[in-house]
Amino acid sequence: MKVIKLILAESSLELVPRDIVGHPAVLRTAQRRGKRPTEMLLDVSLHYHAMKKLRNRHKRGRPDIVHVTLLELLSSPLNLEGRLRIYVHTVNDYVIIVDPKTRIPRNYNRFVGLIEQLLTVGKVPPDSEKPLMEAVAMNFTALLKHLGKEEVILLSEKGELVGTDEVCQKALEEDLPIVIGGFPHGDFSEEVLASAKYTYSIYPKPLDTWVVASRITAACEKLLKILL
Ligand SMILES: C[S@@+](CC[C@H](N)C(=O)[O-])C[C@H]1O[C@@H](n2cnc3c(N)ncnc32)[C@H](O)[C@@H]1O
């Protein structure tokens, strides 16, 4: 049975980096939440001033992007029919492997708590032999190797304009992972760009990650006759 492999690349999801753990904005949230700074997610709406010196900061501190996109993907008929595999590669080179049966919290604060546990302990539930989500240190190239792939279909507003059905057709025909950026602004890194066999755009303007994910899954559902 053919499945669609979807990679959210360079996703804006990480624990607070060590360089800014002493910043007052970080210490304030840590104290309020009764947590160590290094066990909290970086969030631009809370840590804006602390993030000023971070490299690539325009791509960081937006865990809500992965939250909304995972809600969309995991509840899709494509996933319910077992035809979707989701990999969340993060901007600081972790990969979260998501079991298709995972039900992530609908509430954002509960999602943050779950991901903080995942990135601190490495899996959720923490003592499970078959975890629903597992986080491993892995860069994008290593993820492709793990999947037995060398090339991908990259989705970018700068790509060749095609229909969403064509994207799914190519992914199924050539068994290529589809890559969507999990970051709010800017472009893919050279490492990700170098893996693109095809670079496709589905609309002439930039769209949010979850909109692209939803249009692609909808097209795949049609193609696979999951939805009429
Ligand atoms: C919010 S965008 C990334 C930031 C965007 N480059 C910008 O500067 O506004 C998130 C991701 O959605 C995908 N995407 C956005 N617009 C797209 C489009 N028109 N066609 C195909 N993919 C798109 C790309 O994978 C992109 O990395």
Image (cartoon, helix red, strand yellow):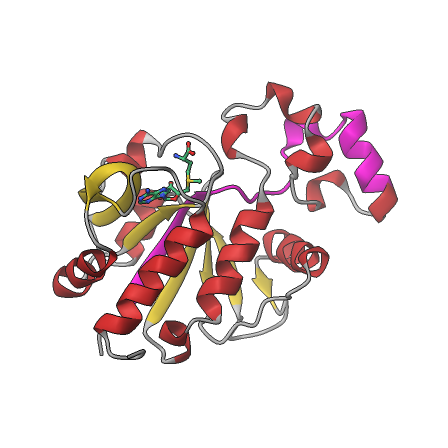
Q: Which residue is drawn at 59% across and 67% down?
A: 104
In the image, 39 versus 9, the foreground residue is 9
Between residue 211 and residue 180, name the one nearer to us. 211
Q: Foreground residue, 50 or 162?
A: 162
Q: Ligand 1 quadrant?
A: top left
- Magenta region includes residue 156: no
Q: How many marks?
A: 0
Residue 110's spot in the image, x, y percent? 71, 60
Place of residue 124 in the rendered image (x, y in percent of width and height, measured from the top left): 60, 66
Looking at the image, is 216 positioned above or below residue 94?
Answer: below
Q: In which quarter of the image is the N terminus?
A: bottom left
Note whether residue 98 is visible.
no
User: Which one is in front, 162 or 148?
Assistant: 162
93 vs 190, left or right, is right
Q: In this view, does 171 lie to the left or right of 189?
A: left
Image point 29% across, 38% down: which residue? 204
Q: Residue 200: x, y in percent? A: 22, 44
Q: Residue 124, relative to residue 227: is it above or below?
A: above
Residue at 47%, 69% in the rendered image: 74
Quarter of the image holding residue 107?
Answer: bottom right
Most distant residue in the left direction: 173
- The part of the image, by quadrant, that contains residue 86 is bottom left
Q: In this view, does 15 lie to the left or right of 149?
A: right
Query: x, y percentage for residue 170?
Result: 15, 58
User: Which quadrant of the rendered structure holds the C terminus?
Assistant: bottom left
Q: Could you tell me if residue 72 is visible in this image?
A: yes
**Boundaries of the magenta span:** 4-31
